Image: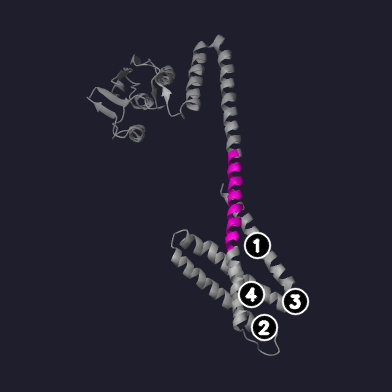
Amino acid sequence: MAAQSFTGKMRLASLHYLVWTSVLLISFFSMLQADGAAKSAISALIGCAFYALIIYGNSTVLYPRFYQGKKYFQYIVYAVALLVICGLGRGYLSTYVRNASFASSPRWLDTWSNLTFLLSMTTVFILSFIFRLAMAYFTLKQQSEEILLQRSQFELKLLKSQVQPHFLFNTLNNMYYEAYLEAPRTALMIERLSEIMRYFIDDSNKDYVSVQTEIDFIENYIALEKIRIMPEPEIEMKLQVDPTRKIPPMLLMTFVENIFKHGIDKISGRNQIHISIQETDNYLSFQTINLINQHSETRKGPSLGLKNLRQRLAILYGNNFIMETTEDGTHYTATLKIPLS
């Protein structure tokens, strides 16, 4: 994206160079027959310099800073000052160069000549508004092209991201059918894994999912965890909730993941887990209770996952939620209460 922006700036700068080169050449050739090459070149350079001062001074400084800032009186004063400085400056500088380098006898500006230079600068000042509009058009056109390019790249990435999961799911399905006849337990693991990955890809980026979708995800996660833990932990789930209710995805998972990360005692094999999901007065109450792992290192403060969960809840619900974790020496209890949509 930075490269695109740099390229756009280079294109705009090239357009400026093209415009001023054209103005310089037109000025030079319009005076060439009468004044000769050297005098025409110097006069064209001086004229273009003051034209640029008028145009850029008005379009990039005075107009945006004062006129658009609704400082109209200051804008008029500075605009008149710019016109006088550029008009008289161009006239006297051109006259000085001509007298010093080309004229056989000095010739100075009269009142009519001064007015002519002032009028020519006024014309350029008016043209500066057209110049500003033209540059704004090309800038807008350039930005539109960049947006279209970014959109095309995004759509291409989106298509790629859609192709890759489909390839992965097709592969997992093939593995499932191959394993089903010879290793049903392995086939079950593949099926659970496929459902978990489908949740991450299809549902985790949504604003809301059904409670049933979240429960299915938790059950699949627990099923995979139980396969690697021997003996299998004793898990009791109590569900008293309308499964069609909507909640943000991945809110309940943190507590469950926390149990298997910190609360499983592989030495004693005593692992009892109670999970409760209930609906009361338009609130969802989620609670997990597990035996404290007496053989693990003592945790200092809440885990990073719990900290992140609390921050996310604060963003979603403000102060309208309850999140508590307690220990009584034997059991670790985590409680979450959130409003239902």
Residue identified by numbered label 3: 37
User: What is the secondary structure assignment of the residue under circle 2?
Assistant: helix
Earlier sequence position, callout 3 versus callout 1: 1
> Disc 2 marks which residue?
98
- Under mark 2, the amino acid is Arg
Task: Identify the residue at image location x=51%, y=18%.
Answer: 190
Q: Position of residue 176 (x, y in %)?
A: 55, 15
Q: Position of residue 48 (x, y in %)?
A: 64, 70
Q: Earlier in the sequence, mark 3 or mark 2?
A: 3
Q: How far apart, in angstroms, are the residues tagged by discs 3 and 2?
A: 13 Å
Please state which of residues 181 and 77 is positioned toward the viewer in this rendering: 77
Q: Which residue is mark 1?
A: 17
Q: Does dot 4 land on a helix, a strand or a loop?
A: helix
Magenta extent: 128-151
Residue toward you, 295 or 104: 104
Secondary structure of residue under mark 1 = helix
Q: Nearer the viewer, residue 257 or 278?
A: 278
- Disc 1 versus disc 4: distance between alpha carbons? 16 Å
Tell me which amino acid carries mark 4: Ile
Q: Main secondary structure of the magenta part?
A: helix
Marked residue nearer the N-terminal end (1 or 2): 1
Image height check: is 133 above or below 56? above
Q: Quadrant of the C terminus?
A: top left
Q: Which residue in the protein does label 4 denote? A: 46
Residue under the image location 70 percent in, 86 percent down: 103
| Label 2 or label 4, whichever comes before in sequence order | 4
